[in-house]
């Protein structure tokens, strides 16, 4: 059986490596349009005095002799440049030079004491100085906070004395409707301006009417500010033509014809990163306004293939981690970290045992769900360098403590009386074995992230799905990982011990994978139920149930996959090693690194 386990682990490791390589090759081929677009990783010393990192996409048709229009794309708060892949893939394949930036304090850009809004303008300045970019055709676009940075770019461009930005697309962000005196105005002048406005945006297009009623994004076109924008800054009090979404309106401003348009994809705010409809709006707008050198219909999109194969990389990395761990435990150095034979599920002794199983799972899920909003509100209010990491870390820590208490109560009130052997299940562990477990886990994490750095260095891609991302990082992020790592580690180690040493049993039938799915689903339930409640209410009433928790609820989207996936990873490793700590430590390290490298970091 030991030989069989080792052979299967070798096969799994090879499959994982093959999937990661396939992910890198295909994702790179898509984002380079089969080699017709070159991708460069830049580190820019900006005029504002900080270093900003970016990806630069240069179509082979963009040269000093035939300069092409250029576009700056920006992510939103707590994201990074890779989140703009739908935009940079589709725009670059249409002949635009695209600069996808990491906003200050995000991605690999410089960390500062204040989250500056100047990133888009600094990116536009950089584009304007490139010899293969047509300075008369420069556009800017940003999602959410990136849209706010885009508005700031327009203000800086207006104040520069030599404005050069000609097209502005705000993606799930409000335009500037009024001037400094509070009067309705066209602050964009003769620029072409558009808005991609999600019909169910959770953060923008909100107002209180004269009767005190709250309105949110579904009512956006009824708002006088939206109508003023579509009427080129005219005062709604003068009686305006009621204008509609997805219609391009033209007017002449300062002797130049320009457009205003609001696209209304039927999506929520963060889905704009991952939306065919939203990407149609982006392509249509810049094709119209900047004259695409290689016009392709907006409905012809290939970025989804990049996203799909980015996720293939995630799957490959997970398979690599599982099987690399197992193989290391079969080496002489780490042989005593694992077991010689696979672990079989324990038998539940009686009906009380079943009640403990289902009750403890339900109690853990309920506790996690009930504390989430309050803990996140508290954690993100603290004066720390990464408020998201602190909020999620505190929640993880408390859920881990609850799991530990639950296991102790179970053992002393039921398990011990029914012959539960903590040593046989791997819970009781010697100090030497624990230290070797930690060393093995660190080796696995280092090698796993070497694959991520390899993907970025040679192919300019990472492993991700939507907002779930495993990406490279600067060395200073290791300090952040140490700062918050203990909070996450408490949960992932406790979760692994609970899911395996305590809950790996014959409940679920003769197929052990059924038990694994049950445990994984209960672990994931809080991250599923809270968004269901929030969005069912939003879609049925046009109002958010917990508007103050909008951001915190959105953070649960990637956590669904994280909680489900890490539970299955820990089960696979435990079955082969009888060591419940090993996968828990690996999971805790990787999730900590994922969290601290996909957020905003400020100097405190």
Image (tube, helix red, strand yellow):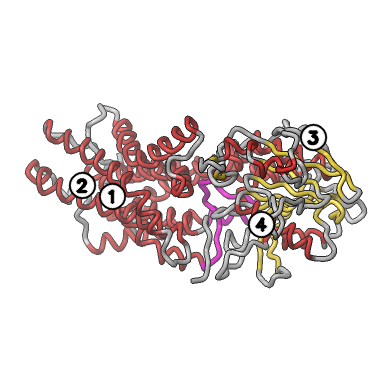
Give the label on residue 425, or none: 2
| Residue 436 visible in the snapshot | yes
Q: Residue at x 7, y 44 (%)?
A: 417
Tell me if residue 460 is in the magenta stretch: yes
Where is mark 3, residue-wise? Answer: 296
Q: Residue at x 31, y 34 (%)?
A: 518
* Neighbourhood count class around disc 2 (C-alpha, 10 Å): few under 14, some 14–19, many 20 upward: many
Query: What x and y, as percent, mark residue 40?
Result: 72, 56
- Check disc 4 and report its element: helix, strand or loop: helix
Q: Tell me whether circle 1 and circle 2 mark residues in contact (CB < 8 Å).
A: yes
Where is mark 4, residue-wise? Answer: 149
Label 1 and label 2: CA atoms lie apart by 8 Å
Which numbered disc, 2 or 4, marks the residue that appears first in the sequence? Answer: 4
Query: What x and y, as percent, mark residue 588?
Result: 38, 55
Q: Is residue 296 left or right of residue 80?
A: right
Query: What x and y, as percent, mark residue 462?
Result: 58, 50
Q: Tell me whether circle 3 and circle 1 mark residues in contact (CB < 8 Å).
A: no
* Neighbourhood count class around disc 1 (C-alpha, 10 Å): few under 14, some 14–19, many 20 upward: many
Which numbered disc, 2 or 3, marks the residue that appears first in the sequence? Answer: 3
Label 3 and label 4: CA atoms lie apart by 28 Å
* Neighbourhood count class around disc 4 (C-alpha, 10 Å): few under 14, some 14–19, many 20 upward: many
Q: Is residue 26 above or below residue 50?
A: above
Label 2 and label 3: CA atoms lie apart by 60 Å
* Neighbourhood count class around disc 3 (C-alpha, 10 Å): few under 14, some 14–19, many 20 upward: some
């Amino acid at each position: 059986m030991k030989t069989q386990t080792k052979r299967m682990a070798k096969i799994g490791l090879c499959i994982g490596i093959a999937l990661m390589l396939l992910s890198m090759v295909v994702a790179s081929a898509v984002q380079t349009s089969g080699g017709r677009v070159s991708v460069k990783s830049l580190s820019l010393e900006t005029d504002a005095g900080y270093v900003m990192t970016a990806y630069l996409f240069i179509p082979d048709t963009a040269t000093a002799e035939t300069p092409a229009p250029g576009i700056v794309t920006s992510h939103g708060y707590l994201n990074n440049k890779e989140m703009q892949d739908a935009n940079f893939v589709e725009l670059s394949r249409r002949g635009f030079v695209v600069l996808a930036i990491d906003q200050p304090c995000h991605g690999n850009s410089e960390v500062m004491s204040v989250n500056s809004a100047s990133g888009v303008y600094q990116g536009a300045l950089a584009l304007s100085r490139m010899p293969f970019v047509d300075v008369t055709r420069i556009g800017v676009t940003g999602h959410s906070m990136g849209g706010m940075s885009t508005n700031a770019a327009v203000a800086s461009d207006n104040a520069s004395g030599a404005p050069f930005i000609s097209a502005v697309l705000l993606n799930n962000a409000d335009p500037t409707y009024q001037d400094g005196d509070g009067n309705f105005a066209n602050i964009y002048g003769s620029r072409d301006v558009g808005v991609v406005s999600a019909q169910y945006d959770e953060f923008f297009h909100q107002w209180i009417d004269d009767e005190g009623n709250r309105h949110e994004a579904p009512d956006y076109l009824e708002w006088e500010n939206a109508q003023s924008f579509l009427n080129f800054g005219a005062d709604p009090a003068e009686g305006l033509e009621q204008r509609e979404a997805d219609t391009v309106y033209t007017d002449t401003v300062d002797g130049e014809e320009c457009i205003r348009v609001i696209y209304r994809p039927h999506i929520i705010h963060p889905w704009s990163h991952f939306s065919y409809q939203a990407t149609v709006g982006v392509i249509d707008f810049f094709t119209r306004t900047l004259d695409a050198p290689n016009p392709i219909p907006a409905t012809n999109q290939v970025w989804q293939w990049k996203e799909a194969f980015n996720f293939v990389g995630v799957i490959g990395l997970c398979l690599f981690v599982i099987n690399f761990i197992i193989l290391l435990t079969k080496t002489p150095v780490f042989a005593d970290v694992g077991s010689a034979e696979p672990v079989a599920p324990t038998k539940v002794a009686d009906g009380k045992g079943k009640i403990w199983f289902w009750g403890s799972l339900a109690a853990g899920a309920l506790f996690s769900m009930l504390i989430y909003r309050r803990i996140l509100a508290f954690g993100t209010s603290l004066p720390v360098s990464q408020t998201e990491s602190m909020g999620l870390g505190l929640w993880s820590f408390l859920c881990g403590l609850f799991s530990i208490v639950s296991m102790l109560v179970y053992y002393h009130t039921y398990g011990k009386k029914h012959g539960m052997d903590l040593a046989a299940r791997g819970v009781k562990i010697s100090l030497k074995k624990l230290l070797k477990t930690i060393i093995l886990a660190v080796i696995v994490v280092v090698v796993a992230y070497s694959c991520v750095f390899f993907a970025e260095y040679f192919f300019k891609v990472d492993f991700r799905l939507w907002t779930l991302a495993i990406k490279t990082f600067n060395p200073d992020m290791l300090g952040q990982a140490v700062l918050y790592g203990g909070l996450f580690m408490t949960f992932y180690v406790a979760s692994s011990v609970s899911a395996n040493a305590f809950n790996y049993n014959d409940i679920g039938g003769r197929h052990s994978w059924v038990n694994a799915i049950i445990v994984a689903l209960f672990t994931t339930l809080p991250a599923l139920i809270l968004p269901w409640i929030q969005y069912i209410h939003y879609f049925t009433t046009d109002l958010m149930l917990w508007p103050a928790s909008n951001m915190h609820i959105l953070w649960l989207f990637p956590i669904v996959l994280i909680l489900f996936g890490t539970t299955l990873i820990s089960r696979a490793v435990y079955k082969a090693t009888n060591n419940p700590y090993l996968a828990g430590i690996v999971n805790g390290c990787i999730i900590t690194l994922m969290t601290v490298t996909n957020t905003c970091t400020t100097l405190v």
